[in-house]
Amino acid sequence: MSKNLVIIPTFNEKENIEKIIRAVFALEMPFHVLIVDDGSPDGTAEIVKSLQASFQDKLHIIEREGKLGLGTAYITGFRFGLNHSYDYICEMDADFSHNPQDLPRLVNACLDGADMSVGSRYTKGGGTENWPMDRLILSKGASYYVQAITWMRIKDPTAGFVCYSHQVLAAIDLSKIKFIGYAFQIEMKYAAKTLGFKIKEVPIIFIDRIEGVSKMSSGIIKEAVFGVLSMRIKSIFNSYSN
């Protein structure tokens, strides 16, 4: 049986954190959970630590000081996963916009031959719920833009619900991943693609958060739009290989 890890970055997720942890541990497929908390002032980390006795050796937390960015949170988690020899390392949000019930489907896609699987809103069978039209247009527009610049045949390149095999993360030089916002998701897929790994999209329904506050900002959007072209140009001269 594979050894699976789910990385969940958090900042002020006290409304969701216990529920999402319990939902992951309730799955029939076994997962360990790593919370990477960026100094949440609302007590998110304290809630996680209060649950560790109930989930001994399965629930882990790394606490960081200040908001250091989504990308660096995941890279911290990736290094933890590699150092602890997990076979499959997943990433997901804490706010239930990613359904924990879809985690086994992502892992099974890798067990069936993919090196990396993506929970996709825009592949056949996927979709979104509770999204305003302007956000949907922005998201789909960004996806088309990324596909045009990078030549990746991935319909949802900005997706943040992903499963990596150990081999993919071990092959990527994580110090070369430069984006720290949502463009991080694009760069990781691009790095895997340029190194020749097989990426499979798995349809999911993305539901906008019910509780807590969205972390989306204009700076994140600018990074995704203006950074992708720079990433593409730099990759011509530099490999993401470890």
Image (cartoon, rainbow, N blue to C red):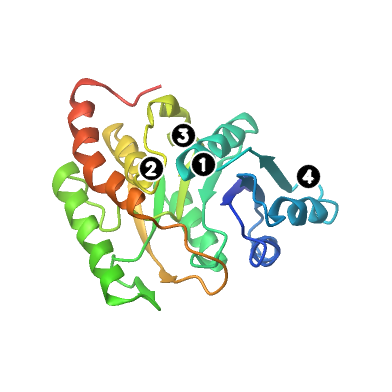
Q: Which residue is mark 3?
A: 169
Q: Which residue is mark 2?
A: 184
Q: Are marks 3 and 4 in contact (CB under 8 Å)?
A: no
Mark sitting earlier along the chain (2/4):
4
Between marks 1 and 4 in the image, the one whose residue lies nearer the viewer: 1
The crowd level at tag 1 (other Cα within 10 Å; few <14, some 14-19, many 20+) is many
Callout 2: SS: helix
Amino acid on which the number 1 mark rests in the picture: Tyr
Q: Which residue is mark 4?
A: 57
Amino acid on which the number 3 mark rests in the picture: Leu
Between marks 1 and 3 in the image, the one whose residue lies nearer the viewer: 1
Mark sitting earlier along the chain (1/4):
4
Which of the labelled discs sits on residue 6, or is there none? Answer: none
Callout 1: SS: helix
Amino acid on which the number 4 mark rests in the picture: Asp
Can residue 2 be seen at all in this image of the molecule?
no
Quadrant in which residue 239 is drawn: top left
Q: Are marks 2 and 1 in contact (CB under 8 Å)?
A: yes
Q: Position of residue 175 (x, y in %)?
A: 43, 25
The crowd level at tag 2 (other Cα within 10 Å; few <14, some 14-19, many 20+) is many
